[in-house]
Image (cartoon, helix red, strand yellow):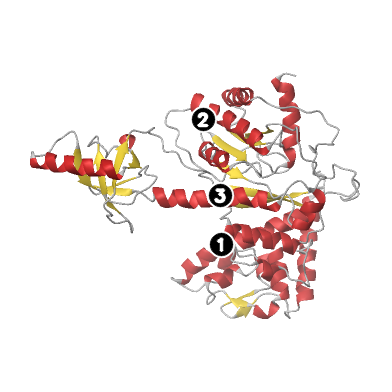
Amino acid sequence: MDRYEKLKILADSAKYDVSCSTSGVRRSNGGKIGNTCAAGICHSWSADGRCISLLKVLFTNRCVYDCVYCVNRRTADCVRASFEPRELADLTIEFYRRNYIEGLFLSSAVEVSPDYTAERILQCLSILRYEYEFAGYIHAKIIPGASQELVEQLGFVADRLSVNIELPTEKDLKLLAPQKKADAIFRPMKQITNTLIEHKRLIGPGIMFKGQHLNTEAHYIKGNDFMLEDSSVQKEARLRFLTPVSPEEREMRVKMQREIAAAGGNKETDKINIEKEHEHTASGDIYVLEERNRHKKVFAPAGQTTQMIVGAGNETDRQILKLSESLYRTFKMKRVFFSAYIPVSDSPLLPDKSVAPPLSREHRIYQADWLLRFYGFRADELLNEKHPFLDIEMDPKISWALRHIGRFPVEVNKASFEELLRIPGIGTTSAYRILRQRRVASVRYEDLKKMGVVLKRAKYFLTCSGKYYGLASLDPEEIRRELLENTQEKQLSMFAVPALQR
């Protein structure tokens, strides 16, 4: 089959992977083709809310695994296809030049072995980066079980890496995907996290040279003695790559420096001191600044993400949120994506094909995940053993507030930033606006709507200058009933047929 037939098959197979946001990463273009700016990526969206400005495709759907929930499992009766590395690279560039896309989201099944598949993906991305000089956004999926060397090399050609967890509990993983092991999934996650931390620490925020801040390309800075081949290091394009010098070469260089100093100095090779911003001090080590590509190699500048399937196993929402919380804390995850399970198998271990995908549950989990990431909530606050599932009818923040009604109402003119964020209807932006207004004058109730507060929800949980604007009593059931009625009325008004004008 030709590459367009392969594209049709492999793009259709990739539609179940939802973790394809770019997070606004910016990669230096430097005269190359493509870009990762927000204006060029993630501005076109499909009807289900997914970005369509990336070429989203599988490298292959030939898989050696037989995961029960997967449409590409080994025993599935489907048409199989695989790209060649150059074939997919050419296709990506062709689509970019037609202005169809601005980037690439590349996932894959496991063909032959994890290392075999990862190596072919690396070949494709290397052709894009180094042969075609494509500087656009690339999101690459890491195959669990791939070698550490391949994972590291993929991190230098891709903007974002991700390893899909798929199933939130180890019990479901053993039942539905027995060939996958939890350790093989978390090992590359840990490697990516450690490499990101180490790379950031070693490169650092930059160095000071003659009072000018530079973004150095040093992989390791330990001392403050450096040999410079060119005194024009001030120019960003002439930044050098620091490499350690052996003890023997160090002694030779020190001897040469003394001889040069005794002779009155040398303009071509001059020893200078570079003052760094942070804790690094002179250790006696000498590093040589060598020639390097003028564009800095950065490891996965957009970080890493992962994805979990919702509804394929017997997991609870609490288990999903606790795992997400752990991933954000342990692996510094940029984002955890959730995908409602779409029945693609007749297996008795999975929901029946007649069961609709749990889209409402997915939506509530995303809302709860937002509370974990930006509002300071913990998973154990939102859910507990008595309430292991989120309320499908109610926003998780409102559900939490109704279960903790004793904390309310909160006076907006006295509450701290953290307390304001706990009030339903108040977000981070409106909370900052309230704090700024309070420095000048007291916040009035009529000011709240102008600040972005959703008063239809917030009025039940706050007071303004001591006055309460909610119901006569703080009864959680009455508040819940009125909020649901308001929501239903709003939904009906959206679909109401306007009367014909005469």
Sequence-earlier tag: 2 or 3: 2
* Marks 1, 3: nearer the viewer: 3
Query: In the image, what residue type sits under mark 1?
Result: Thr
On the rendered image, what quadrant is the C terminus found in?
top right
Q: Mark 1 and 2 residues: CB-CB less than 8 Å, in contact? A: no
Query: In the image, what residue type sits under mark 3?
Result: Gln
Badge 1 element: helix
Q: Position of residue 450 (x, y in %)?
A: 56, 61
Question: In this figure, which residue is indicated by the disc labeled 3?
Answer: 191
The label number, if any, that marks residue 7 in the structure image: none
Q: Residue at x 72, y 76 (%)?
A: 471
Left or right of residue 353: residue 341? left
Left or right of residue 64: residue 328? left
Sequence-earlier tag: 1 or 2: 2
* Label 2 to label 3: alpha-carbon separation: 23 Å
Q: Position of residue 435 (x, y in %)?
A: 49, 68
The label number, if any, that marks residue 428 in the structure image: 1
Is 427 in front, or is 159? 159
Q: Position of residue 316 (x, y in %)?
A: 78, 61
Badge 3 element: helix
Question: In this figure, which residue is indicated by the disc labeled 2?
Answer: 129
Q: Looking at the image, is 197 positioned above or below residue 51? A: below
The 10 Å Cα crowd at callout 3, few under 14, some 14 to 19, many 20 or more, is some
Q: Residue at x 54, y 65 (%)?
A: 431
* Marks 2, 3: nearer the viewer: 3
Q: Looking at the image, is 466 positioned above or below residue 264? A: below
Left or right of residue 490: residue 329? left
List the single residue furthest toward the top. Answer: 2
